[in-house]
Image: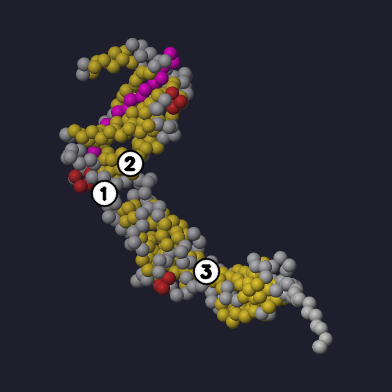
Amino acid sequence: MKRVIIKKSTYLWWIMLGVFLIYLPSAFSEVDIDFSTATDQWERNGIYEISVILQNNDSESVKIAGVQADFAYESEDFKEAPILVHDYITGYSFTVNTVNTLTEGLVYYSKGIKVTGSPNYFTVNGNSSKTLVTFRLRVENAAALGVSHLPFQVTVAVEERLVGGGTSSIMGSANNGTITVVADVTPPNTYAIPTGRTLIQGNSTLVRLDESTSPNYDDLQKVYYEVGEPPVSEPTTGSSWVAEGGSVQLPINDASHPGAITGVLKFFGRDYWGNQEASFNIETYTIDMVKLTLSGLSRTPEIAKLGSQITANFTVDELPAATEVSVNNHAFTPGGSYPNYSYTYHVQASDAEGPRPIRIAVTDDSGNQTVDTSLSVIIDMSDPTFTPVSFSPDP
């Protein structure tokens, strides 16, 4: 952790480059601004955090109007930027201003936060600390430039809201430090969390990327997967590269797996350095791409009246996990056993009349569903009507 302690005294004047910086008296006497980094060794394209922490060492509270943090990195080739500000994290509502200033010998990256109005002032209680802002930085071009050590300086300006109105500024710089850029030779780890241990056509799984060592944030660039039957020597199905946090359809080609098999998924990750893992955490799943087949469909009777029993007969080639038979959205009563089934239903007064389809839906353990509506029955509950006819005697 690199720390600069900024102390305020009554009417202290600083003269620098002909500019007077006036530090007005305030409700507190000492403020520490801490710059916290997890490590001084950064891998190329790894994402790291630097936190700006304000420590109020006085018993009274202080209201802070804003904070501006400027990062300066010295580069051997000022035409290219070795460090980029990735994003920032803060618990306060601020407007974000980014300024990239390029000067010979130094590349400055300014990432600041400014308040938009008095409701956004926040308070640091007496004798307490608060993280003002956390920046995420990424090392990008350092390796291409041949840079192994990046001297840096962090300057922070904190604007304090005075009790009597107005604001005053507190400025300070952290001690100069050096980030050591190290080569990454460790392959990443890649794995996936499936939507279910059994995968059917159209299932997706969220790809997770994990770096087992520092940095804390993922160093992976992309990932792809292969599907095959164990042992996997030659993949039968492969995907294109998938970005971190993306979803992939598993598998992508149903012709590759004509039936329910125990398959494996091999996930391969590649990081920004080009390190690619041979294989990691081979996952085993049941891959079932085949729907059930219905045969032997029949029904009795052809015409049913109120109270009549309708019977639907069918055969399934695989034991179903769920079976639904209905007419007019009214469920049939189950009957029979695998593989031959006979479901029955008695016509009710609420049934619609006329030709009505019988819906048969069977679903296997994997979730593959087959629906058939080829059977139908005529429901007729209306009494016949007639017109009286009279006869006259023959003349």
Give amino acid for label 2.
His
Q: CA–CA distance between discs 2 and 1?
A: 20 Å
For residue 314, which quarter of the picture? bottom right
Few, some or many residues within 10 Å of mark 2 (<14, 14–19, 20+): some
Q: Quadrant of the N terminus?
A: top left
* Residue 161 shown in magenta: yes
Q: Secondary structure at mark 3?
A: loop
Q: Is residue 75 in sight in this rendering?
A: yes
Q: Secondary structure at mark 2?
A: strand
Q: Please state if 353 lies on the left or on the right of 125 as rendered.
A: right
Q: Are marks 3 and 1 in contact (CB under 8 Å)?
A: no
Q: Please state if 379 lies on the left or on the right of 279 as rendered.
A: right
For residue 156, which quarter of the picture? top left
Q: Nearer the viewer, mark 2 or mark 1?
A: 2
Residue at position x 23%, y 44% from top?
142
Whichever of labels 2 and 1 marks the residue nearer the N terminus, that label is: 2
Q: Look at mark 2 in the image and give the residue it sits on.
A: 86
Q: Look at mark 3 in the image and give the residue it sits on.
A: 368
Q: Which residues are magenta?
A: 149-164
Give amino acid for label 1.
Ala
Q: Are marks 2 and 1 in contact (CB under 8 Å)?
A: no
Give residue 34's position: percent from left, percent from top. Answer: 37, 29
Give residue 292's position: percent from left, percent from top. Answer: 54, 74
Q: Please state if 299 lies on the left or on the right of 25 as rendered.
A: right
Few, some or many residues within 10 Å of mark 3 (<14, 14–19, 20+): some
Give residue 132's position: percent from left, percent from top. Answer: 40, 30
